[in-house]
Amino acid sequence: MRKLLPVALIGLAALVAAPASALDLTKKRQNLPDLVLGNEEGNDFVVENRDIEMESGKAYRLRIVAKGRQEYKFYAPEFFRYIWLNQIVINHLEIHGGGPPDHLEFDDPGEIAIEFVAIKPGAYKWEARGLEAKGMTGTITVK
Protein backbone atom coordinates (compact mmCIF):
# COMPACT_ATOMS: atom_id res chain seq x y z
CA MET A 1 0.00 0.00 0.00
CA ARG A 2 2.85 2.38 0.84
CA LYS A 3 4.40 1.90 -2.61
CA LEU A 4 1.11 2.70 -4.36
CA LEU A 5 0.49 5.98 -2.51
CA PRO A 6 3.42 7.93 -4.06
CA VAL A 7 2.54 6.60 -7.53
CA ALA A 8 -1.11 7.59 -7.04
CA LEU A 9 -0.10 11.07 -5.84
CA ILE A 10 2.16 11.59 -8.87
CA GLY A 11 -0.65 10.45 -11.17
CA LEU A 12 -3.13 12.78 -9.46
CA ALA A 13 -0.69 15.70 -9.71
CA ALA A 14 -0.21 15.06 -13.43
CA LEU A 15 -3.97 15.02 -14.00
CA VAL A 16 -4.45 18.25 -12.11
CA ALA A 17 -1.52 20.06 -13.76
CA ALA A 18 -2.15 18.92 -17.35
CA PRO A 19 -5.49 20.67 -17.92
CA ALA A 20 -4.18 23.94 -16.46
CA SER A 21 -1.31 24.12 -18.92
CA ALA A 22 -3.42 22.85 -21.82
CA LEU A 23 -6.02 25.58 -21.22
CA ASP A 24 -3.59 28.50 -21.15
CA LEU A 25 -4.65 30.09 -24.42
CA THR A 26 -2.42 33.12 -23.88
CA LYS A 27 0.67 31.02 -24.67
CA LYS A 28 -0.44 30.71 -28.33
CA ARG A 29 -1.30 34.35 -28.86
CA GLN A 30 -1.50 35.72 -32.42
CA ASN A 31 -0.53 39.27 -33.35
CA LEU A 32 -3.27 41.17 -35.16
CA PRO A 33 -2.45 43.95 -37.65
CA ASP A 34 -1.78 47.23 -35.85
CA LEU A 35 -4.76 49.60 -35.72
CA VAL A 36 -3.07 52.93 -36.50
CA LEU A 37 -4.63 56.33 -35.80
CA GLY A 38 -3.19 59.19 -37.86
CA ASN A 39 0.15 59.18 -39.63
CA GLU A 40 3.51 60.89 -39.45
CA GLU A 41 2.85 62.90 -42.62
CA GLY A 42 0.40 65.15 -40.81
CA ASN A 43 -2.90 63.44 -41.64
CA ASP A 44 -4.33 63.07 -38.16
CA PHE A 45 -7.59 61.50 -39.31
CA VAL A 46 -6.44 58.56 -41.42
CA VAL A 47 -6.90 55.04 -40.01
CA GLU A 48 -4.84 52.02 -41.00
CA ASN A 49 -6.53 48.64 -40.47
CA ARG A 50 -9.83 50.15 -39.30
CA ASP A 51 -11.58 46.77 -39.56
CA ILE A 52 -10.03 43.87 -37.66
CA GLU A 53 -11.22 40.23 -37.75
CA MET A 54 -10.50 37.34 -35.41
CA GLU A 55 -11.94 34.05 -34.17
CA SER A 56 -13.70 33.34 -30.91
CA GLY A 57 -11.77 31.24 -28.42
CA LYS A 58 -8.33 32.35 -29.58
CA ALA A 59 -5.75 34.59 -27.94
CA TYR A 60 -4.57 37.80 -29.61
CA ARG A 61 -2.44 40.89 -29.22
CA LEU A 62 -3.81 44.09 -30.74
CA ARG A 63 -1.56 47.13 -30.82
CA ILE A 64 -3.39 50.44 -31.11
CA VAL A 65 -0.88 53.00 -32.33
CA ALA A 66 -1.37 56.78 -32.36
CA LYS A 67 0.83 58.51 -34.92
CA GLY A 68 -1.14 61.71 -35.36
CA ARG A 69 -1.05 64.84 -33.24
CA GLN A 70 -4.65 64.62 -32.06
CA GLU A 71 -5.83 63.46 -28.68
CA TYR A 72 -7.41 60.09 -29.45
CA LYS A 73 -9.91 58.56 -27.05
CA PHE A 74 -10.33 54.97 -28.23
CA TYR A 75 -13.74 53.58 -27.24
CA ALA A 76 -14.83 49.98 -27.94
CA PRO A 77 -17.10 49.24 -24.95
CA GLU A 78 -18.91 46.17 -26.27
CA PHE A 79 -15.70 44.62 -27.57
CA PHE A 80 -13.95 45.24 -24.24
CA ARG A 81 -16.93 43.69 -22.44
CA TYR A 82 -16.84 40.46 -24.48
CA ILE A 83 -13.15 39.56 -24.27
CA TRP A 84 -11.13 38.04 -21.48
CA LEU A 85 -8.45 40.66 -20.95
CA ASN A 86 -5.07 39.24 -20.02
CA GLN A 87 -3.17 42.52 -19.89
CA ILE A 88 -2.71 46.02 -21.27
CA VAL A 89 0.89 46.94 -22.10
CA ILE A 90 2.19 50.52 -22.30
CA ASN A 91 5.95 51.14 -22.68
CA HIS A 92 6.70 47.58 -21.53
CA LEU A 93 4.67 48.16 -18.36
CA GLU A 94 1.77 45.78 -17.80
CA ILE A 95 -1.67 46.51 -16.41
CA HIS A 96 -3.67 43.54 -15.14
CA GLY A 97 -7.20 43.75 -13.84
CA GLY A 98 -10.50 42.04 -13.42
CA GLY A 99 -12.65 44.14 -15.70
CA PRO A 100 -12.67 45.92 -19.03
CA PRO A 101 -11.29 49.43 -19.48
CA ASP A 102 -13.70 52.27 -20.21
CA HIS A 103 -11.45 53.61 -22.98
CA LEU A 104 -7.81 54.05 -23.98
CA GLU A 105 -6.54 57.60 -24.35
CA PHE A 106 -3.57 58.90 -26.32
CA ASP A 107 -2.47 62.45 -25.44
CA ASP A 108 0.69 62.02 -27.52
CA PRO A 109 1.89 59.60 -30.20
CA GLY A 110 2.52 56.13 -28.81
CA GLU A 111 1.08 52.66 -28.58
CA ILE A 112 -1.03 50.57 -26.25
CA ALA A 113 -1.17 46.80 -26.70
CA ILE A 114 -4.03 44.71 -25.39
CA GLU A 115 -3.61 40.98 -24.95
CA PHE A 116 -6.84 39.03 -24.70
CA VAL A 117 -8.92 36.01 -25.62
CA ALA A 118 -11.87 36.73 -27.90
CA ILE A 119 -14.98 35.27 -26.26
CA LYS A 120 -18.28 36.30 -27.83
CA PRO A 121 -18.78 36.42 -31.63
CA GLY A 122 -20.13 39.67 -33.02
CA ALA A 123 -19.31 42.86 -34.89
CA TYR A 124 -18.18 45.53 -32.43
CA LYS A 125 -17.82 49.19 -33.32
CA TRP A 126 -14.87 51.24 -32.15
CA GLU A 127 -14.47 55.01 -32.35
CA ALA A 128 -12.08 57.78 -31.50
CA ARG A 129 -14.62 59.71 -29.46
CA GLY A 130 -15.24 63.20 -30.82
CA LEU A 131 -13.57 62.40 -34.15
CA GLU A 132 -16.21 60.08 -35.63
CA ALA A 133 -17.30 62.64 -38.23
CA LYS A 134 -13.70 62.74 -39.47
CA GLY A 135 -13.74 58.99 -40.15
CA MET A 136 -12.13 57.77 -36.95
CA THR A 137 -14.32 54.66 -36.59
CA GLY A 138 -14.16 51.00 -37.48
CA THR A 139 -15.25 47.49 -36.60
CA ILE A 140 -13.72 44.64 -34.67
CA THR A 141 -15.35 41.39 -35.77
CA VAL A 142 -15.15 38.17 -33.78
CA LYS A 143 -16.28 35.11 -35.76
Image (cartoon, rainbow, N blue to C red):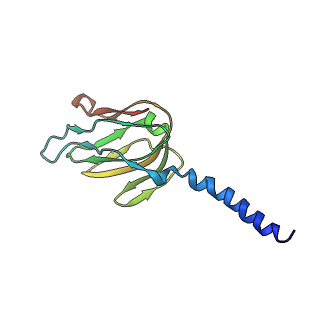
Q: Residue furthest right?
A: 1
Number of labels in the image equals 0
The answer to whether any part of residue 16 appears in the image is yes
The answer to whether any part of residue 128 appears in the image is no
> x, y (%) of residue 36?
26, 43
- The quadrant of the image that shows the C terminus is top left
Q: Nearer the viewer, residue 109 or 52?
A: 52
Query: Residue at the spot x=47%, y=43% of the render?
Result: 58
> x, y (%) of residue 81?
49, 37
- The quadrant of the image that shows the N terminus is bottom right
Viewed as shown, does residue 113 lie left or right of 24?
Answer: left
Seen in the picture, residue 68 relative to 92 is either above or below; the reply is: above
Q: Nearer the viewer, residue 96 or 130?
A: 96
Q: Residue furthest bottom?
A: 2
> x, y (%) of residue 47?
23, 38
Q: Residue furthest left?
A: 41
Seen in the picture, residue 6 relative to 99 is either above or below; the reply is: below
Viewed as shown, does residue 139 lie left or right of 47?
Answer: right
Instruction: Determine the image quadrant of residue 8.
Output: bottom right
Instruction: Determine the image quadrant of residue 5.
Output: bottom right
Query: Residue at the spot x=67%, y=60% of the render?
Result: 14
Q: Nearer the viewer, residue 120 or 25?
A: 25
> x, y (%) of residue 138?
31, 32
Seen in the picture, residue 76 relative to 30 is either above or below; the reply is: above
Viewed as shown, does residue 7 lie left or right of 51?
Answer: right
Query: Residue at the spot x=39%, y=48% of the render?
Result: 30
